[in-house]
Image (cartoon, rainbow, N blue to C red):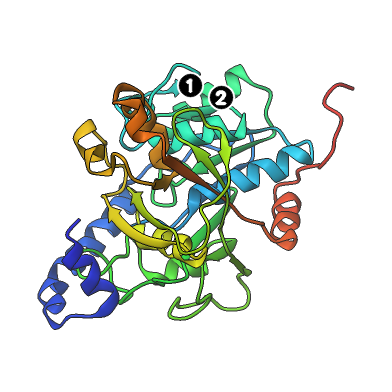
Amino acid sequence: MSQGLIKAWYQGAWWLWLLWPLSIIYRVLRRLSLGLAATPAANHLPLLVVGNISVGGTGKTPLVQALVHDLSARGIRCGIISRGYGGSIGKGPYLVGPTDIASKVGDEPLLLWRTTGVPVAVGSNRQADIKCLTSKYALDLIISDDGLQNHTIKGDCEWLLIDGQRGLGNRQCLPMGPLREPASRLHTVDAVFITGSSASRGCNLPPRAVPTYEIKPKLVSLKRLCDDEPVAWPVSGTAVKALAGIGNPERFFNDLQAMGLQVEGSGFKDHHDFVSEDLVPFLDVILIMTAKDAVKCKAIAASQNQPRNQHWYYAEQGLDIPEPALAALLNKLHLDANKDHHG
């Protein structure tokens, strides 16, 4: 995606109106595809779909991580399905395992599997992914990481995320704007989560009938890339390089700067397939990357001259999901927290 186009979506540019006819065609084709789509099969287990309507990152992965952690602590057994962007699985289904790499299963599914401890199935056929999980595991809830635009499944509950810094841009559909669906989609979901700072500015908030929550992902720990050992954060004022191959790299760089670091950031496209040459400029310097990038870069670091990348680290994010949002989810999906699975 052109950085110039993305900048125009969020900061404005007169020439975007030249793309208006294409946006009309996009919306017409989307309506036609909706009309032709088969009715999704009924879910045998409750299905929560977590997604967004805009191009670029909104913080879905940290939210899913936090949600699984909170639900697991309440005795709710979760499984995750994901498309596996950046991987080679294709249709699937495929269960993520300990020997898998990001180029096979995708960076986000691999990160979710490693950090949540719950089963993760990847593949473009979401119904098959669900069947794969339910045939092998006793679960209470399936969470779809992304999928609001996938019409082969129908969530029993839908959570929509908006980047609080970017909002919805000019609120136009592709390619004139960043939206995959019209902004009116906000009115049909069960909850809206605004991530990051400047909580509601420019976000085209839904009516009060749709619960809206502010969540603020924060950097909670720093680990050494080569061995995953926790380390102390550099002291305030330290000059560091930062690397991010996510939907909105600037958000990560801003978070590091908020910790008092002097950051020189290098942004890559979302799901970037890192190669050794990408990391050569960072030899012999302090480098901090996202946990999502770390699942791809760790093998590269191991194959390089080890003494020259001993100061490569990755930052882990965390967030607190509002208790009212959890309570509403449990109530709507009739999930019994702390139930006895052995009785």
Q: Is residue 154 visible?
A: no
Position of residue 177 measured from the top left corner of the image (x, y, whole percent): 25, 69
Residue furthest right as drawn: 343
Circle 1: residue type: Leu
- Residue 289 vertical placement versus 141 (above, below): below
Q: Mark 1 near mark 2, Cβ–Cβ under 8 Å?
A: yes
Which residue is identified by label 2?
133
User: Label 2 crowding class (10 Å Cα cut-off): few <14, some 14-19, many 20+?
Assistant: many
Circle 2: residue type: Leu
Q: Which mark is residue 159?
A: none
Residue 56 appears left or right of 156 = left
Which residue is identified by label 1?
95
Q: Rounded to the nearest whole Å, what is the CA distance between mark 1 and mark 2? A: 8 Å
**Quadrant in which the C terminus appears:** top right
Of labels 1 and 2, earlier in sequence is 1
Q: Nearer the viewer, residue 119 or 174?
A: 119
Position of residue 158 measured from the top left corner of the image (x, y, whole percent): 55, 54
Q: Residue at x 52, y 50 (%)?
A: 50
- Residue 248 vertical placement versus 76 (above, below): below
Q: Secondary structure at mark 2?
A: helix
